């Protein structure tokens, strides 16, 4: 009996972890790729860079002349995070069997202070809506939390570059998503040209507007409600007001 309870608890825990957080009311929030190179030091990197496992590793990618985009991991050449003069290096897999070190590449930044999280690869809707960052999906393996790119041609495998040109691939990983809470609207100082009460003194329904704003700015909207009221009179019915 104890074994059955343990098995049920384990299965339930796994299933709950697959659902992740509810993002039904969230909006997209863009992350920005910034050009960098190995000639820079740690102090030259953008302050809004996205760390991976502390402040020694960061998310990067290389874009080839053909337009291919390969995500990899940027690493400081010194383990001392406080050393602002530490250099940077970047490795990315360019195929299932080959990884290369790149001189010119891009680093992923978060200038709009998006909410970031790593979601299961099985969260298809979340990954599709919030996980594409300018044409790149950033994956991270479960075991060592190393970042790489996802090769859909191989059934969705994550390809991670290792130093020395080796490549590791994984079918179990998480995906970086970025989002912000949905817009919350508060109506104040609302002025009505006419009374909202009908002839019987009851509140008359005016209507409802849904305003969606994806920009990180404050906007002012002028909302106008209109209604058509008609009167129909029949010989065999009492007067009927149609709204």
Image: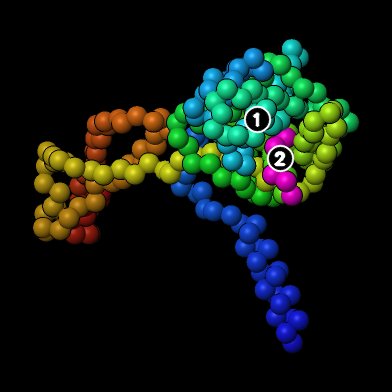
Location of residue 4 with respect to 98 vertically, above or below: below
Q: At 83% from the left edge and 39% from the top edge, which residue is drawn?
A: 168
x, y (%) of residue 119?
A: 62, 48
* SS assignment at label 1: loop
| Magenta span contains residue 146 | yes
In the image, residue 32 lies in the stretch drawn in magenta? no
At 24% across and 38% down in the image, what residue appears?
226
Q: Position of residue 195 (x, y in %)?
A: 11, 46
For disc 2, the marked residue is 146
Q: Which residues are magenta?
A: 143-148
Position of 213 compared to 234: left or right?
Answer: right
Q: Nearer the viewer, residue 35 or 202?
A: 35
Classify the position of the N terminus by image quarter: bottom right
Dot 1 alpha-carbon crowd within 10 angstroms: few under 14, some 14 to 19, many 20 or more: some
Residue matched to label 1: 78
Report, in whole angstroms, how far the alpha carbon at label 2 lies from the one at label 1. Answer: 18 Å
On the picture, is 209 further left or further right than 166?
left
**Whole-percent x, y for residue 48 in the image:** 49, 29
On the rendered structure, is 181 left or right of 117? left
Q: Secondary structure at mark 2?
A: loop
């Amino acid at each position: 009996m104890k074994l059955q309870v343990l098995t049920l608890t384990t299965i339930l825990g796994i299933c709950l972890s697959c659902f992740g957080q509810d993002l039904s009311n969230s909006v997209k929030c863009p992350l920005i790729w910034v050009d960098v190179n190995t000639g820079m030091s740690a102090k030259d990197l953008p302050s809004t860079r996205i760390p991976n496992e502390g402040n020694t590793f960061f998310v990067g990618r290389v874009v080839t002349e053909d337009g291919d985009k390969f995500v990899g991991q940027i690493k400081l050449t010194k383990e001392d995070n406080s050393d602002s003069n530490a250099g940077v290096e970047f490795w990315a897999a360019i195929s299932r069997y080959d990884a290369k070190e790149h001189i010119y590449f891009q680093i992923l930044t978060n200038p709009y202070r998006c909410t970031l999280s790593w979601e299961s690869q099985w969260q298809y809707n979340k990954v599709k809506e919030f996980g594409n960052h300018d044409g790149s999906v950033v994956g991270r393996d479960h075991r060592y939390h190393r970042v790489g790119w996802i090769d859909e041609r191989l059934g969705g495998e994550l390809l991670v570059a290792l130093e020395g040109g080796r490549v590791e691939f994984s079918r179990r990983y998480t995906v970086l998503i970025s989002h912000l809470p949905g817009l919350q609207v508060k109506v104040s100082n609302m002025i009505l040209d006419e009374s909202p009460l009908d002839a019987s003194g009851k509140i008359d329904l005016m209507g409802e507007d849904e305003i969606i704003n994806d920009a990180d700015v404050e906007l002012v909207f002028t909302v106008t409600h209109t209604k058509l009221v008609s009167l129909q009179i029949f010989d065999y019915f009492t007067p009927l007001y149609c709204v």
